[in-house]
Image: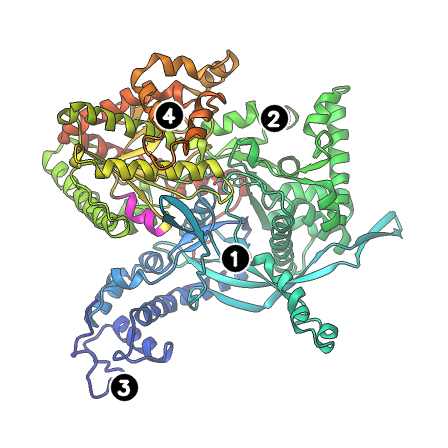
């Protein structure tokens, strides 16, 4: 960081007033003003953080101007709105994105540079808003960007976690979790709204009272928590629309227990307050397993209840008929985490606003859509009836009533099929009585969608096969997408300006325009420029790798990247089997023929997921041996990038050559990293899983490396008795690799350390079929290596990937949600 130039702020006046000169742009003037009047600093005393703050305030001013007008426009035109309910929003940093979307990036950069600062350095001061685990949370953030960009009146609702996704450090090769204190410094992007607070009840009991048509219910003796709103503006790209993300924070209803305090027991006096405020304290770090914990259910109900109350308050600002509700609001459930909203809306309509049950139910089903994000059985949320009834007694009653009517309908449609009733019931009676949230979400929604064609098909034939018979037409597909603003423009400015130069800027709003570069794949000069950009991005990444891991990598080697949550089904271990195979080939004297590779891993393991953590450790142990072996030189390097997060992804995607998307077929619902990497000019090596299937359709069979068993073949193999030992004995390279893991080759100090991995693969049946796919994977990796030697052909195919992934813009995805599910129109100013 350089110091400001004397020209802008003179020594004499620096202590009192900014020297704002007429040659300066309004933005440069605003930067200096905010430094003084918002941060109370002068350029003489300003730190990098102060300059970040004044930059953020400056950009924020522009955002707010459009934001208030958007809100006014919504009030005036009263359009239908969509509410996206999600326990996770994985936004990342906001400053660059806001400046980009507003079109003031260059002015901000120039303004700062006039003052002697570089925008790239200043933006690094912002903590990531890491209010999500992985794909599901990042998708929600991409959707917010696209809704604003498409001028769709949409609001996100979630929780303002005080601590987001944990920060991962690697100590002695192992993951260590550290709290993510992202709100340590003031969060410039949020606005506290104390005027928007709601009471959320827990516990207590239900009492009945007579009404003129039967019986009503009061929920009494409950404990209350206050939900206070915090708003974050979401600016669209190249539009005046700025939408809102409203996050709820839990506040105790009373400051403290006065009786305890008067008794001189101060600690006890604030205890209750702490317990209450714990609700919004921390994000659950499980990516694909339901926790079943009371606090998690409290989080879910807390944010859902506040959101539904807020939605109804807004609806009731005008006098209208309840029948209009579905014409004015659509609510999307981001997986089952907010599925309790179905019961909450019934509660609000029936108990609070006194609608007839049947009338309310008709409205509810017209309002909700439910998106499923995973088929993994351990991710399917269920709650014990005991816990549910204790925490939310009235809602349990409502769910029983919904279930009763649903089962009656099913029985009417399929008379006598009691097995069917047992299977589809919202209450699972087999398992100590549990509430099945996915069933509640399906029954309470008019449309259920999967997130890629294959996934949606599998939903209909496996997880929701019964429901698909009961509700034909309810299940649809909407393939995921990513926002090109963050995942192309912002993270890869060089490629973006090259594209703008050759095809104009239209692709920023219609990503399918990228197909205009198809002919340029045949243009040698274009390929050269394209390669130079990739080289620059790799160099930038290499420098960062060196800084954070100490490993020096060769920027001309093939950057082979797998970045995503660590999970057995994603098969980071299969990738590592390949790494060790390459290492063995080098050790046995075949180094010369090998294409140099840098294999980069990144991702977090859920803190309680022992096997995933063991895999991280093995990656690091393998890296330590391989990277230090003089026989290897720069033919092979292995790097584990710590604390993979959105801002790290922005560096990693543009620097990748090869995108690893190697989940067992039928396990990855969609994947979105696959889209981000292809858009940044990486070739994919992948299975026919999730959105890989559609990426292949788009980019063409020749431009993607597909290997392994298909979903059907996986099912057949399992049905016919899969025996991993057959593969172990049949392939000498595989056997050697597995034996090394089992016998402690990579951990001489503790030879048994990875025995459990070997056992999982061989003694316990290799649930994700790594061994069955190994040979095909290795052969395909060999083809990758061979192609990489032909840089012209490699770049030709990489260009075709960029050209043909326009379908995977989240603008297309949101357009489909808007027309097929939400029935909502844009409101353009
Ligand atoms: C499901 C249940 C629970 C309790 C926690 C997390 C999830 C979950 O599905 N998480 C998730 O991130 N899913 C991913 O969603 C992405 C967006 O649709 C997909 O691209 C990924 O394939 C999917 O794993």
The residue pinned by badge 2 equals 468
In this picture, is 216 found above or below 608?
Answer: below
Comes first in the chain, label 1 or label 4: 1
The secondary element bearing badge 1 is classed as loop
The residue pinned by badge 1 equals 161
What residue is shown at x 26% (from left), y 82% (from top)?
A: 18
- Measure the alpha-carbon separation of dots 3 and 4: 62 Å
The secondary element bearing badge 4 is classed as loop
The quadrant in which the N terminus is found is bottom left
The residue pinned by badge 4 equals 687
Q: In this view of the protein, can residue 96 be seen by the observer?
A: yes
What residue is shown at x 38% (from left), y 36% (from top)?
A: 750
Verify whether residue 653 appears in magenta.
Answer: yes
Comes first in the chain, label 1 or label 2: 1
Which of labels 3 and 2 is toward the front? Answer: 3
The secondary element bearing badge 2 is classed as helix
Which of labels 1 and 2 is toward the front? Answer: 1
Which mark is drawn over residue 15? 3
The secondary element bearing badge 3 is classed as loop
Q: Is residue 722 left or right of residue 798?
A: right
- Measure the alpha-carbon separation of dots 1 and 2: 36 Å
Verify whether residue 559 appears in magenta.
Answer: no
The magenta segment: 647-654
**In front of the other: 73 or 372:** 372
Comes first in the chain, label 3 or label 2: 3
- Measure the alpha-carbon separation of dots 1 and 4: 36 Å
Crowding at mark 4 (Cα within 10 Å: few <14, some 14-19, many 20+): many
Residue 453 x/y as whole percent: 45, 28
**In front of the other: 596 or 736:** 736
Q: Is residue 703 left or right of residue 751?
A: left
């Amino acid at each position: 960081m350089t110091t400001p130039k004397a020209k802008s702020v003179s020594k004499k006046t620096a202590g009192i007033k900014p020297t704002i000169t007429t040659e300066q742009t309004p933005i440069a003037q605003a930067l200096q003003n905010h430094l003084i009047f918002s941060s109370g600093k002068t350029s003489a005393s300003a730190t990098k953080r102060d300059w970040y703050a004044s930059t953020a305030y400056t950009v924020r001013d522009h955002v707010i101007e459009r934001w208030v007008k958007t809100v006014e426009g919504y009030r005036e035109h009263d359009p239908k709105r969509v509410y996206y309910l999600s326990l996770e929003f994985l936004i990342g940093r906001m400053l660059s994105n806001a400046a980009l979307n507003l079109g003031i990036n260059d002015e901000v950069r120039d303004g700062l540079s006039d003052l002697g600062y570089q925008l790239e350095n200043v933006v690094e001061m912002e903590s990531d808003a890491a209010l999500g685990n992985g794909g599901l949370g990042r998708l929600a953030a991409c959707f917010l960007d696209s809704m604003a960009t498409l001028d769709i009146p949409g609001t996100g609702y979630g929780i303002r976690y005080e601590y987001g996704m944990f920060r991962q450090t690697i100590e002695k090769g192992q993951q260590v979790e550290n709290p993510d204190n992202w709100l340590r410094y003031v969060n410039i992007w949020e606005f506290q709204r104390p005027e928007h607070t709601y009471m959320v009840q827990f516990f207590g009991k239900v009492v009945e009272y007579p009404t003129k048509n039967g019986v009503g219910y009061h929920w009494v003796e409950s404990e209350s928590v206050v939900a206070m709103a915090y708003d974050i503006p979401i600016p669209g790209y190249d539009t005046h629309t700025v939408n809102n993300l409203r996050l709820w924070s839990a506040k105790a209803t009373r400051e403290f227990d006065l009786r305890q305090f008067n008794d001189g027991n101060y600690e006890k006096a604030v205890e209750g307050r702490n317990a209450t405020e714990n609700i919004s304290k921390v994000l659950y770090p499980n990516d694909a397993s339901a926790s079943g914990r009371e606090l998690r259910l409290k989080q879910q109900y807390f944010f859902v209840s506040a959101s539904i109350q807020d939605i109804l308050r807004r609806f009731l600002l005008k006098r209208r008929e309840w029948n209009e509700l579905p014409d004015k609001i659509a609510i999307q459930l981001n997986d089952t985490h907010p599925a309790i909203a179905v019961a909450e809306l019934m509660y609000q309509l029936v108990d609070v606003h006194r609608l007839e049950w049947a009338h309310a139910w008709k409205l509810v089903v017209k309002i909700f859509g439910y998106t499923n994000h995973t088929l993994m059985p351990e991710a399917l949320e269920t709650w014990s009836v005991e816990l549910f009834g204790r925490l939310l007694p009235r809602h349990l009653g409502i769910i029983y009533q919904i279930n009763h009517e649903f089962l009656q309908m099913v029985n009417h449609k399929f008379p006598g099929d009691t097995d069917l009733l047992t299977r589809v019931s919202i209450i699972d009676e087999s398992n100590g009585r549990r509430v099945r949230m996915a069933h509640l979400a399906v029954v309470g929604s008019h449309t259920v969608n999967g997130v890629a064609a294959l996934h949606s098909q599998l939903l209909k034939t496996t997880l929701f096969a019964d429901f698909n018979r009961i509700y034909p037409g309810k299940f649809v597909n909407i393939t995921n997408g990513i926002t090109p603003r963050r995942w192309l423009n912002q993270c890869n400015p060089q490629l973006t300006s090259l594209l703008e130069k050759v095809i104009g800027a239209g692709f920023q709003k219609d990503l399918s325009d990228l197909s205009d570069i198809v002919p340029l794949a045949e243009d040698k000069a274009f390929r050269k420029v394209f390669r130079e950009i990739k080289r620059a991005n790799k160099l930038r990444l290499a420098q960062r790798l060196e800084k954070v891991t100490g490993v020096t990598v060769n920027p001309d080697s093939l950057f082979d990247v797998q970045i995503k949550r660590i999970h057995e089904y994603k098969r980071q271990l299969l990738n590592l089997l390949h790494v060790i195979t390459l290492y063995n080939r080098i050790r046995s004297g075949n180094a010369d023929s090998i294409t140099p590779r840098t294999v980069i891993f990144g991702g977090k393991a859920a803190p309680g997921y022992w096997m995933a953590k063991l895999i991280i450790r093995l990656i690091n142990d393998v890296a330590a041996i391989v990277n230090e072996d003089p026989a290897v030189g720069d033919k092979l390097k292995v790097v584990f990038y710590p604390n993979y997060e959105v801002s790290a992804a922005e560096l990693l995607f543009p620097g990748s050559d090869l995108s690893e998307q190697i989940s067992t077929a039928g396990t990855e619902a969609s994947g979105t990293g696959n889209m981000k990497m292809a858009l940044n000019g990486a070739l994919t090596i992948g299975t026919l899983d999730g959105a890989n299937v559609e990426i292949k359709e788009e980019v063409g069979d020749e431009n993607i490396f597909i290997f392994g068993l298909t979903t059907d073949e996986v099912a057949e193999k399992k049905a016919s008795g899969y025996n991993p030992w057959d593969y172990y004995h049949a392939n000498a390279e595989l056997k050697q690799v597995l034996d090394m893991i089992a016998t402690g080759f990579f951990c001489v100090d503790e030879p048994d350390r990875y025995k459990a991995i070997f056992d999982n693969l061989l003694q316990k049946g290799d649930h994700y079929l790594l061994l069955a796919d190994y040979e095909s994977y290795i052969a395909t990796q060999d083809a990758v290596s061979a192609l990489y030697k032909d840089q012209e052909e490699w770049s030709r195919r990489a260009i075709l990937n960029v050209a043909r992934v326009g379908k995977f813009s989240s603008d297309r995805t949101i357009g489909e949600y808007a027309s097929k599910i939400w029935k909502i129109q844009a409101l353009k100013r």
